[in-house]
Image: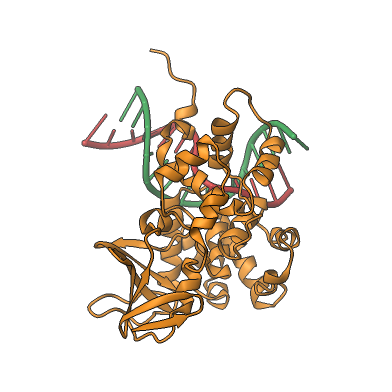
Chain colours: A orange, B green, C red
Amino acid sequence: MTSDNGSFPVRILSPTKALFPTHSFDLSSTLSSGQSFRWRKQGKGWSGVVGPHPVHLSDSPEGLVAETAVPIGDWSWLIRYLRLDDDYSAIIRSFPDDEPMRSALATCPGLRLLRQPAWECLVGFICSSTKQIVQIEQCLDLLSQRYGQPVTPFPHRPPGMAFPTPAALIDAGEVGLRACKLGFRAPYVLAAAQAVADQSLDLTALEFLPTAEAQAVLTRLPGVGPKIADCVLLFAYGRQDAFPLDVWMLRGLAALYFPRRKPSLKRLRHFADSHFGPWAGYAQQYIFHYVRCHRPDLRARALRPPISQ
DNA sequence: CGTGACCCTGCTCA
DNA sequence: ATGAGCAGGGTCA
């Protein structure tokens, strides 16, 4: 049986299981490329919670298989989250044809962008500042375990947790948030929760603002600068003109595209905004993943001057 | 524009 | 093997 969920054909395998035919979706690189922090490898696949839905994703010869704990009639929420309705081959073709881009494409084919719920994405990236990905994951696990609502569990498994609401994090208070290892980010998350709760920040309304204006709204929040705002705009709102520049990307762009010179921050910013075409945000994810996973020589520690014997 | 402080912890190297 | 010491997908003052 096939059902039409928006613009992507789904094959319903059972009331709780569906197949999404695609041969160009790599779960591992997508779910561990540092755009989302709540997916965990489980057996041959990946487990996570999308909004209120616990999901297990795995590969099959025919495409992506998704399984949930309760019968699902309409899978459009997952299609949206996984951006399955993107024209992937057109996106890839739009990338600039240069050596770094070719290398990045060759090393992680099937890397995809996600479209995450804005609130969860915002909190995730507020937590990300000066932290390593494993640490961010740990923070978000603690937050969800302690302050999220349990979602219907898979049989014989502990319940997954929905991401905590702003109200739940306000209840947690700064002390509760610090206990989740947020450190100096705790008051930042609290302020964001309060802004959403008292409606001085309307995350839904950002959808309709030009990227620059949406960025201005987000950076008004304490603890949210241009980098974190760009992450939220790209990973939750799909803004392709949001190109987060973090230390990895700065080192990566400099090494890959300006090997001789030492480009200024301003130069790199301009390059990032002008070089990568209509799907720049997507291209960014390829460069980032490539630099992080395949260029250990560009790690900060590797860049320290070698100690002489 | 540059610089340090901010919480905390995993990683690295002695 | 064990423990300092350091730096980590930033932001603010």
Residue drawn at the location 40% of the way across and 43% of the way down: A107
In the rendered view, tell whether residue A74 sits above or below residue A185: below
Q: Quadrant of residue A293?
A: top left
Counting from the top left corner in percent of width and height, residue A237 is at 61, 65
Residue A113, can we see it? no
Please tell me which residue is depicted at 66% across the width and 54% down the height of the picture.
Answer: A241
**Left or right of A143 on screen, residue A61:** left
Which residue is at a point 51% across and 52% down the rendered structure image?
Answer: A92
Seen from this angle, which residue lies furthest top? Answer: A309
Residue found 41% across the figure and 54% down from its top: A110
Q: Is residue A67 visible?
A: yes
Q: How far from the left and from the top, in percent, is residue C6? A: 48, 32
Residue A74 or residue A300, whichever sits in front: A74
Q: Which quarter of the figure is the N terminus of chain A placed in?
A: bottom left
In what quadrant of the picture does the C terminus of chain A appear?
top left
Q: Position of residue A177 (x, y in %)?
A: 51, 64
Which sits in the foreground, A76 or A8? A8
Closer to us: A184 or A100: A100
Q: How many marks?
A: 0
In the rendering, at what x and y percent does residue A10 appear?
39, 77
Q: Quadrant of residue A265?
A: top right
Q: Return the residue nearer the eye: A110 or B4.
A: A110
